[in-house]
Amino acid sequence: MAEIMYWEAIRRAHDEEMERDPLVICMGEDIGVAGGTYKATKGLYEKYGAERVIDTPISENGYTGLGIGASFLGVRPIIEIMSVNFAWLAMDQLFNSAAKVRFMSGGQLTAPVVVRSAGGTAHQLGAQHSARMEKVFMGIAGLRVVTPSSPRQAYGLLKSAVRCDDPVYINEHELMYNMKGEVPDEEYFHPLEGSEVAREGSDVTLFGYNVSVHWCVQAAQTLAKQYGINAEVVDLYALAPLDRAGIAASVRKTHRAVIVEEAEPAVGVGAEVMAIINEECFLELDAAPVRVSAANVPMPYNHGLEKAAIPNAGDVVAAVRKMFGK
Amino acid sequence: MNVADKKRLLREMLFARRFEERCYEAYVERKIGGFLHLYPGQEACCHGVLEAARPGHDYVITGYRDHVHAIKCGADPKEVMAELYAKETGSSKGRGGSMHIFDTKHHFMGGYALVGGPFPLAAGMAKAVKMKGGDEIAICFLGDAANNQGTFHESLNMAKLWELPVLYVCENNLYGIGTRIDRSTAVIDQYKRVAGYNIPSAQEDGQDIEKVFKAAKKAVDHVRSGNGPYFLELMTYRYRGHSMSDSNAYRSKKEERMWSDRDPIIMLRDRLIKAGEMSKDDYKAMDTELLDEIENDIIAFAESSPEPRVDELERYVFADNDPWVYGGGR
């Protein structure tokens, strides 16, 4: 098992799928000749040519719709939207066309597109380049939403997403492309549904996804070492549909839940997981579930303000300590 | 276009007219719900263009005024009516409705209800055809008002940039919902707007099916021969309001009369009568036959069909048992 970077894992998945199936293409801004802003398509233009590695104009809704139309006829486009902030512009095609076409055609037509995008906050990118939009995507029926927290997931989720007949949105993270991790040498397909226990524990469950899984793991180590609290960490790599059974199973074991999200709290992953806990296993709870979320502000440019707007492992530790009265 | 073709087209257009008028009645009777956008007045556009193309072979996509395009592609009118009646036997199994008729086995790739939504989808289908090396073309029918959406410009740019085999047909009926074109659009002649993308284009009388056919033939040949996209503007008029909820109060009687004097069906009929190819009685007999078919065959089928089952509400959201959802099968 080799250790590779997140971007390399995504690149490898692209390469293998394009090698296997001539109808797999990739498209997006700067992905071809320039090699991709995050290098996720590096070298593919040279290998597969301009017909299959398509540098698009800056027309997010247009090229997303074009990819969806191509997918109607069996093409499997992997569409990169450079930054999730630009995906707002592609919402029309993604939601109105891709997510709904199977249903509104009575199962005649499907849109097997993959849309990948870099989300999250990075370093002082300001209000219009720091959106965390997973909450928007996961609220739309007909769209699968996954979000890799490691190179292994980034590789395996993309592999499965390309082959799945449903449209899949993959929420990546601006700060994670250079993260290293082990990826199986052989082909690996990660499930598009479910959740993973990233750390076994017994006292409280910390639910995270994408970058917040790492905050949770870090917090769990501190909690164990300094406060004797044994936290379980559940990685919600699938945001739509969410793993109701997996969420409930962990809460039944620990009886306490903290949901950690990089996004603003309203109508988000935390709210949704709390609702699931209430619906599935309310009587198992020993304490009210808690959210650790971003401040409800457009992202500030100032570094200090930006840091204050986004949660971190310390905030998770503080939330758990409060819950335990420690 | 020979005499037999003209007679067949007259019959097809009259059928389309009577079908849509019967939809109107069914809507008033509350047998059809939702929004209903009818096609009377514009028949020569759909029929003339698709006559010049290969319906059932070429990939056709349009907006919400879609019943007639689906039928001309080969959709069974019984299934289209059953869809409007929201029945399980409908073309979209009662899940789509008037604005979302689909018949993919005849390459009718759907009606879409966001104005301008099909522009990039059509370009994408053309991209797929080009990749797969087929001789199909993509044909996108939309109204003039769709050209004020960003997707129009984004799609034309990409279609030309990558020389995609797509024909954009603009059925210019002069109104975007209830707003007249000169009150919404800086450039009235739509075919001129595509010059900025270096796409060849033409404007034609959309009421005269022979003229439409001729212009469309040129357009289709251009696209099918690998010369990239083409844009054809057809000047036409819808007789009814934008949808059934539109009182149609924004147009003058004079204007409406001017257009109904150039009715595409009557024009072709009179031409055939004048040429001695058809009598008034022949036409009346044909009309009676079509009305009978619609009532006894099509409406009866829709009326007697079952509703979708409520326990199947969540079907068709995702693919059934896709193994890749579970990482390649469990």
Image (tube, grey):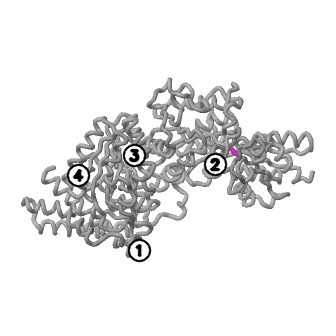
- Residue identifier under label 2: A133
Q: CA distance from mark 3 to mark 4?
A: 21 Å
Q: Which label sits in the foreground, 4 or 1?
A: 4
Rendering quarter of residue B229: top left
Along the line of sight, the residue nearer the viewer: B101 or B311: B101
Tag 2 near tag 1, CB within 8 Å:
no
Which residue lies at the image location 74% right of the left edge and 43% below the top edge? A302
Q: CA distance from mark 2 to mark 1?
A: 41 Å
Residue type at the position of mark 2: Met
Q: Which residues are magenta?
A: A236-241
Instruction: Tell me which chain the residue with mark 2 is part of.
Output: A
- Horizontally, residue B269 falls left or right of residue A194, namely left
Instruction: Tell me which chain the residue with mark 4 is part of.
Output: B
**Residue B226: horizontal and vertical position, in percent?**
31, 35
- Residue identifier under label 1: B30
Q: Which label sits in the foreground, 3 or 2?
A: 2
Q: CA distance from mark 2 to mark 4?
A: 47 Å
Tag 3 near tag 4, CB within 8 Å:
no
Numbered badge on residue B212: 4
A238 is within the stretch colored magenta: yes
Q: Which label sits in the foreground, 2 or 1?
A: 2
Residue A238 visible, this angle:
no
Instruction: Tell me which chain the residue with mark 3 is part of.
Output: B
Along the line of sight, the residue nearer the viewer: B88 or B204: B204
Q: Which label sits in the foreground, 3 or 1?
A: 3
Q: Earlier in the sequence, mark 3 or mark 1?
A: 1
Along the line of sight, the residue nearer the viewer: A7 or A324: A7
- Horizontally, residue A8 falls left or right of residue B149, namely right
Q: Earlier in the sequence, mark 3 or mark 4?
A: 3
**Residue B289: horizontal and vertical position, in percent?**
21, 67
Numbered badge on residue B122: 3
